[in-house]
Image: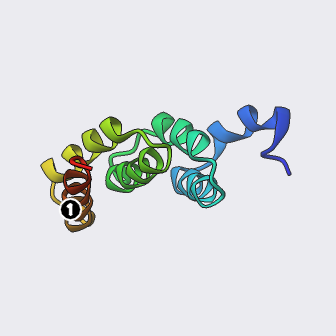
Amino acid sequence: SLYIGKWRHKAIPDLPVVTLLYVSISFLETDRAPEAISHLLQLASDEYEDEINHLLLYGYLKDNKRDKAEGIIAKLLLNPGAYTKEAKEIEAKLKERRWF
């Protein structure tokens, strides 16, 4: 595939943000959270900020980076949007598990 190997770094910057979101989702679905996180952190888009943060949240959770996940939850709760309810539910679950 064009994406894999030495062409990865040349091809990525030219892709639209929405395509890079799908690439990140693919990484998350194939248990490659560090790669998804790496790509998501490079994205800057006001239009897709909530989606980027939502995917970062799942990436950090899959990668067992609880502190970073909690930071993303705080961002999602600060600016209420499509993922606010889900962020609140995840935050509650994380708080429950803190004691175990």
* Horizontal and vertical percent position of residue 19: 59, 56
SS assignment at label 1 = helix
Residue at x 27% of width, y 59% of height: 90
Residue at x 83% of width, y 47% of height: 2
**Splitting the image into 4 quarters, where does residue 60 fall?**
top left
| Residue closer to the observer: 89 or 41 | 89
| Residue closer to the observer: 91 or 3 | 91
* Horizontal and vertical percent position of residue 96: 20, 56
- Disc 1 residue crowd, few under 14, some 14–19, many 20+, Cα 10 Å: some
| Residue closer to the observer: 15 or 21 | 21
* Horizontal and vertical percent position of residue 27: 63, 52
* Colour approach in the figure: rainbow
| Residue closer to the observer: 78 or 30 | 30
Residue at x 16% of width, y 52% of height: 77
Residue at x 20% of width, y 67% of height: 85
Count the labels in the image.
Answer: 1
Q: Which residue is mark 1?
A: 84
Instruction: From the viewer's perspective, tell me whether residue 39 is left or right of residue 82.
Output: right
* Horizontal and vertical percent position of residue 24: 57, 52
Instruction: From the viewer's perspective, tell me whether residue 46 is left or right of residue 92.
Output: right
Q: Residue furthest front?
A: 100
Residue type highlighted by circle 1: Thr
